Amino acid sequence: MLTPSMEDYLEKIYELMNEKGYARVSDIASSLSVQPSSVTKMLQKLDENQYVTYEKYRGIILTARGQRMGRLIQQRHHMLAEFLRMLGVSEETIQKDVEGIEHHVSPKTLDSLQAIVLFFEEHPECMEQFQKYRRERAGEEPVE
């Protein structure tokens, strides 16, 4: 079982690997605002759990298991962000809220949220009705 911290590291490694083709301890440390020694300790844990292959001074390789989990974590992150975006939440708040939500939502709830996101994507007229309702409740001016 992955801890929220392990998920954050795995998500960042997956992201860096996709962006740059590699992930270094220093890249992970700077992007997560942690010390390189903390990254090394986490990489050792992820290696023990077979999510990465890590050898000091040689680099980091995501295992097939790590690739799958990294992709799932990233997809979950994007789906939650899109859900909050649909609700009209500001981008700044979205990033903070997703970080708080993503590790504490059950898979069943995530499936339901995904269904809502997909429903609104497939039925934009319903999304328009929802946005109108939300604006009216907030006392905002109607959008023409």
Image (cartoon, rainbow, N blue to C red):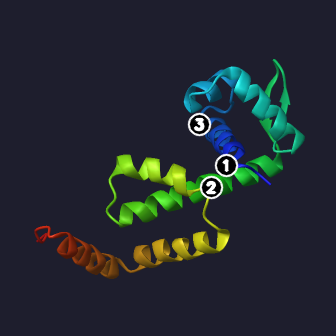
Residue 49 appearing in the image: yes
Amino acid on which the number 2 mark rests in the picture = His
Q: Which mark is residue 4?
A: 1
**What x and y, as percent, mark residue 103?**
62, 55
**What x and y, as percent, mark residue 91?**
36, 50
The residue that mark 2 highlights is 103
Whole-Å distance between the Cαs marked 1 and 2? 6 Å
Whole-Å distance between the Cαs marked 1 and 3? 22 Å
Where does the C terminus fall, quadrant-wise?
Answer: bottom left
- Whether residues under marks 1 and 2 lie with C-beta atoms below 8 angstroms apart, the answer is yes
Residue 56 image-quadrant placement: top right
Name the one closer to the observer, 13 or 36.
36
Label 2: few (<14), some (14–19) or many (≥20) C-alpha neighbours in 10 Å: some
Amino acid on which the number 1 mark rests in the picture = Pro
- Whether residues under marks 3 and 2 lie with C-beta atoms below 8 angstroms apart, the answer is no
Identify whether 15 is placed above or below 86: above
Q: Give me the residue at 59% from left, 57% from top.
A: 75
Q: Give me the residue at 61% from left, 27% from top.
A: 34
Q: Mark 1 vs mark 3: give the one in front.
A: 1
Q: Give me the residue at 70% from left, 24% from top.
A: 25
